[in-house]
Image (spheres, helix red, strand yellow):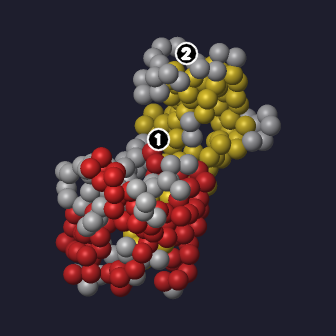
Amino acid sequence: MKKISDNSYIVNIILINVDDGTERPLYERENSRCHFSDEFSYDDYKIRFRLDWGDIENGEPVLKADISLDSKPKKKLKGPWHHIWKNLDPHGSYIYDFEFKGLKFRFLAKKTIQHNISSDATVSASRAILIIDENADHEPYDKVKRLLKKLGSFEILTASCGEDGISLIAIEGKRPDIILLDLLTPFERGKRLRIGEGLREKKDKFVGLTEDDAFDIFFPKISPAEKFLEKLREKGLLDSTQVILLSGIGGFEDSKARVLRFFLEYGVEFCVENPSTYAESKQVVKTIEQCLKKKH
């Protein structure tokens, strides 16, 4: 949420293609001065639009584009690879024109503005969600955070391991309504979980076993998620929050039931796929809605 005056904040930004009316939502990353579009492909390039609030001209942000080769997605191209310029439309709004190797867009930045917030007030959320995942502050969760903004006001808390999550709750006094708990994120700070460690030695045990039995052998005991939930229960905080497990285990619908049975004693009822795609992100948010309805 970007502050533009003493009592006004920009809640969200949509780029509207003024030629065909299509919309391209921009999302805000935490601790960034920019709003970003989703990345899209064009020929051998990846392109992402970025509305930069650091170089404000006449009260308007500057539209830029991050462009990289498909073969080197992490290396942005430097130099005069594209052109973006601004013009005023008849209504006084800025139009941004973008041109790159035959690709042309003309955008109008549509802003949703929230008023009547005092300059010294903090924007408090009525609900809090804690994400425990090594990638909680990175790309896989950007879509989830964007979708949550459409549901209402949430305080998004993040922790890169279970230990940090417990610290947020028990020491800093944060009280999340929902915890998104990645199944295999290490509990201990600074540790990495080696998936499949010792699997070669266990492989012979799979012969003649049912899928359920094989899953029991493969699934780590005690798992990082169980360590976190046990700590939460020790501190008397397990009953006050809903936990959603995030799993990347293949054959998801089958494995979900197997995963959940490990957590029955902790009262965990929900397990969803890690949000690596837009559809999976929507499912995560839908499950959060279910949890909130159940909680209230």
Q: Is residue 108 left or right of residue 160?
A: right
Q: Position of residue 206 (x, y in %)?
A: 38, 56
- The residue at which mark 1 appears reads as 34
What residue appears at the point 57 percent right and 45 percent down from the top-left corner? Answer: 26
Between 150 and 181, which is closer to the camera in this rendering? Answer: 181
Between 137 and 275, which is closer to the camera in this rendering? Answer: 275
What residue appears at the point 34 percent right and 57 percent down from the top-left corner? Answer: 205
Q: Is residue 28 above or below residue 51?
A: below
Q: Is residue 149 left or right of residue 91?
A: left
Between 262 and 52, which is closer to the camera in this rendering? Answer: 262
Q: Secondary structure at mark 1?
A: strand
What type is the residue that disc 1 sits on? Cys
Between 128 and 288, which is closer to the camera in this rendering? Answer: 288
Q: Is residue 133 above or below residue 212?
A: above
The nearer-to-camera label among 1 and 2 is: 2
Q: Position of residue 176 (x, y in %)?
A: 37, 73
Q: Position of residue 156 (x, y in %)?
A: 41, 62
Along the polypeptide, which appears first: circle 1 or circle 2?
1
What residue appears at the point 52 percent right and 41 percent down from the top-left corner? Answer: 36
What residue appears at the point 53 percent right and 51 percent down from the top-left corner? Answer: 143
- The residue at which mark 2 appears reads as 81
Q: Secondary structure at mark 2?
A: loop
